[in-house]
Image (spheres, helix red, strand yellow):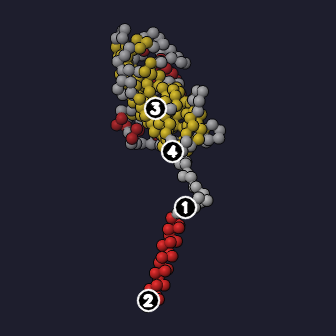
Amino acid sequence: MTKHIKFFSAVILLSLIGLQCKKESDPKDPIIPTPEPATGTVMVNVKAYSGTDPLVYGTTYTNANSEQFKVSMFRYYLTNIVLMGDGTTPDYVQPESYYLVDHGSANATYQIKLDSVPKGTYKGIKFIIGVDSLRNVSGAQTGALDPGNGMFWTWSSGYIQFKLEGTTVNPSGNFAYHIGGFKGAYSAVKENAFVFTGTTLQLAGGATKNLNIQSDVQEVFKNPAVWNIASMRNISTAGASSKTIADNYADMIRFGSIQ
C-alpha cells in the first residue's frame, strides 16, 4: 500500500511540474496578433446652410432673386445612400436606407449612422433626395416612411419629397413649398453624387469616421432656374412649378469635410 501511495504521489508531482512548465511561455513561440475588424462606422452629419452661412431659423437671408426671406421649416427625404469605392474598394450600399432629414430647430445637424461599412478607401457618396417609386407604391410603412410624419399625400398615395416653409420680408407674407411626385415628367425624386474634394475617406476596421456634408437652402432658388417666391407662394401638387424647384434642389447637398 505504501508503495502505491508513493507511486501516485510521484505521478501527481510530475503532472504539477508539467502544468507549471506549460504556463511559462517559450520566447520562441510566435506572437499571434489580434485580427483587425473587417468593418467600421461612418457618421454622415448633414448641416443646413444658407450659402456659406449656417442656416438659422428666423434669420433674414437674400435669395438669387434679391428677395429677403426667413425659414421656419426645412425637411426632406435622403435615401438610398451609397459610399463610392476607389476602384479597389467596392461600393458600400446601405440596406434599408431611408431618412427624413428635419433640420428642426435653429442650426441643427441631422446625423445618419452607416454601420458595418467594410474597411477601405471611399472617394464619394451617392444618394437620392426623395423616396423611390417602389416605396411610394408599397402601402403603409413605418419609421421614416410612416405617413404620420406629415410627409405623405394621402389623397394621391405618394410621399412629399421636400418641404420648405417660411416668410418673405418685403412684401411680407408666408410661403410653403411641399414638393411631391415620383413618376412621369413631374417627378421630384432626384439622384445625386459627388466626390470628396481633394481627399478620400479611409476607413480602418473598428474605426469611426465623420463625413460632414452641407445642405444649402439657397439652391432652391437658383440653378438651373431663378425662382421668384412672390410669383407663387404655395405649392402642394406635382406640376411644372414643383418640378422647377425639385430641379433646383437636386444639387443642394455638397461635400464639407472628413474627420
| Residue bearing mark 2 | 2
Q: Is residue 180 visible?
A: no
Q: Point out which mark residue 45 bears.
A: 3
- Amino acid residing under circle 4: Gly
| Residue bearing mark 4 | 206
Report the Cα–Cα distance between label 1 and label 2: 37 Å
Report the Cα–Cα distance between label 3 and label 4: 19 Å
Report the Cα–Cα distance between label 3 and label 1: 48 Å
- Local secondary structure at mark 3: strand
Q: Position of residue 53 (x, y in %)?
A: 44, 18
Report the Cα–Cα distance between label 1 and label 4: 30 Å
Query: Which badge, 2 or 4, is on the more N-terminal residue?
Result: 2
Q: Residue at x 48, y 26 (%)?
A: 214
Q: Is residue 145 above or below residue 232?
A: below
Tag 1 near tag 2, CB within 8 Å: no
Q: Residue at x 48, y 84 (%)?
A: 7
| Residue bearing mark 1 | 25
Q: Residue at x 58, y 27 (%)?
A: 197
Q: Nearer the viewer, mark 3 or mark 1?
A: 1
Q: Looking at the figure, which quarter contains the N terminus?
A: bottom left
- Amino acid residing under circle 2: Thr
- Amino acid residing under circle 3: Asn
Q: Position of residue 224 (x, y in %)?
A: 55, 18
